[in-house]
Image: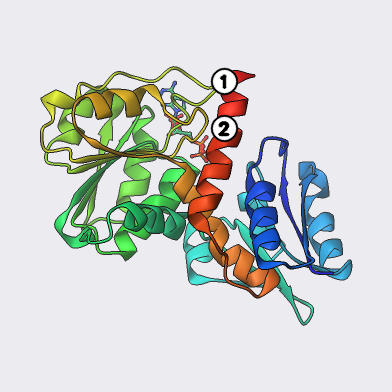
Amino acid sequence: MMKAAVVGNPVDHSLSPDIHNFWLNEAGLKGVYTKKTVRDENLTDFITSAAKEGFSGLNITVPHKEKALKACDVLSATAKELGAVNLITFKNGIIFGDNTDGQGFIESIKEKLPNISFEKNSFAILGAGGAAKGIIHALHKNSAKKITIINRNYKKAKDLANKYKETAVPFDLKDIKKGLNGASFLINTTTMGMRGGPASINIDFLSFPEILCFTDIVYNPKTTNLMKSATKSGVKVIGGIGMLVNQAVPAFQAFYGEEPRNLDKLYSVLENKMKVIDND
Ligand code: ATR
């Protein structure tokens, strides 16, 4: 039986099993997809033994994305550039590492805005952590016109912007107004507003009429405070669940050799699950 798992620590709240098991069920496949809590010191052993135990592959989540890369024999160009993997596959005794997070983000935007031209838009990114790295890399690959990176720790924003010198400009979170200037998209990649995470800053979207779309990669809660205030100001809002689903698409294809089906139904299944969590 084809098997795969998501590996993290903690991993209890991962929605990846819901996504893959939904698609397995829709396709009538007899595969399994589980969650594995693995401690840092056991990660490399876990990955190498999973290959021998007949796993098709693994998804890697926080905090293991960087360390898991070191266990791979062959890396995709994206994984190499980001120094992090979220997808590992096993084939003929070789461990392959890839990173599908950033392209998952791009696909989630295209799902809601099919005609979007990345070349014509400027993107303001809140945050400079792992999630920001993947998204900025993908935006750059998709020829984004301009990217501003706004972060509490300015040095991290600066180091990241340095990798995309022609396109990216760093800003301190204190200078957010300058960073938002001219942007048509704002993307929150920080943990601000996440359930159990730090409170969010306030953004008066009405003061930035050029912002047409706000995307929050936080998907729990389903509607963050920033999403609420963007909606109130007439800004189009795209939630974080789409990125999670879209990063899983190439993983499902790699693990089980089939195309994922019924994405609309999957979104309603996940949204219902989030509602239950909201009421907990
Ligand atoms: P991830 O891999 O999910 O991106 P991360 O690498 O820990 O996680 O990055 C978290 C991001 O959220 C960072 O940009 C962080 O800002 P700093 O680099 O300044 O730490 C941002 N962040 C977390 N808590 C924050 C807060 N209270 N205010 C502003 N930014 C915050």
Q: Mark 2 or mark 1: name the one nearer the start of the chain.
A: 1
| Disc 1 within 8 angstroms of ligand 1 (CB) | no
Q: Looking at the image, which residue is at 62% across and 61% down?
A: 87
Q: Quadrant of the N terminus?
A: bottom right
Q: Is residue 254 above or below residue 234?
A: below
In the image, residue 210 lies at what x, y percent? 11, 38
Q: Nearer the viewer, residue 276 or 86?
A: 276
* Mark 2 neighbour class, 10 Å CA radius: few under 14, some 14 to 19, many 20 or more: some
Picture disc at residue 47: none
The residue drawn where x is 48% and y is 19% is 198
Image point (29%, 18%), residue name: 202
Q: Amino acid at mark 1?
A: Gly
Quarter holding the C terminus is top right
Which quadrant holds residue 139?
bottom left
Q: Give the alpha-carbon distance from disc 2 to disc 1, as whole Å.
A: 15 Å
Mark 1: secondary structure: loop
- Residue 160: horizontal and vertical position, in percent? 37, 47
Check disc 2 and give the amino acid type: Met
Which mark, by number, is residue 196? Answer: 1
Considering depth in this image, is 198 or 29 the residue closer to the camera? 29
Would the CB of label 2 be found within 8 Å of ligand 1?
no
Looking at this rendering, what residue extends furthest in the bottom direction?
92
Left or right: residue 20 versus residue 274 is right
227 lies left or right of 64: left
Looking at the image, can residue 134 be seen?
yes
Q: Is residue 140 above or below residue 92?
A: above
Residue, disc 2: 274
